[in-house]
Image (cartoon, grey):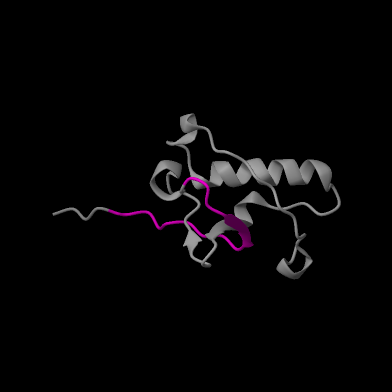
Amino acid sequence: MEESEWPQQTSKIQVPKSWQEKTVRDVIGLFVTAYNKKSVDRQIDLDEVHFANSEGGKLYSNDIVGSVLEDRADYYIKFGKHERPAVVKAKI
């Protein structure tokens, strides 16, 4: 699905405290799963989206919920993969 074809839809959820150690991708998955169940003709690929905050700042999908998501804040699902690159430790 192209970004221009994306639906304009608002959903609100409260992320349970037990999800503090899960990834942002897991939270996005809640929205994507619910949307895809209702819209079988226009599926969203979880691996091709990310969250952005109300100022447009991207959140890494592989970041931990408790470290980056704020309580009662607005986040938007945006087109495009956005993951924090893996850190490779150099051997000394």
Looking at the rendering, which quadrant does residue 5 occupy? bottom right
Residue 23 painted magenta? no
Q: Is residue 73 above or below residue 55?
A: above
- Residue 92 position, x and y percent, is 13, 54
Magenta segment, prevailing SS (helix, strand or loop) = loop
58 vs 76, left or right, is left
The residue depicted at 77 percent of the width and 45 percent of the height is 36
The residue depicted at 42 percent of the width and 50 percent of the height is 68
The residue depicted at 50 percent of the width and 52 percent of the height is 61
- Residue 88 position, x and y percent, is 30, 54
- Residue 91 position, x and y percent, is 18, 53
- The furthest residue to the bottom: 4
Q: Is residue 65 above or below residue 81?
A: above
State the residue in front, 68 or 83. Answer: 68
The quarter of the rendered structure image containing the N terminus is bottom right
State the residue in front, 54 or 5. Answer: 54
The residue depicted at 68 percent of the width and 52 percent of the height is 45
77 vs 65, left or right, is right
Q: Is residue 34 above or below residue 88?
A: above
- Which range is magenta? 71-88
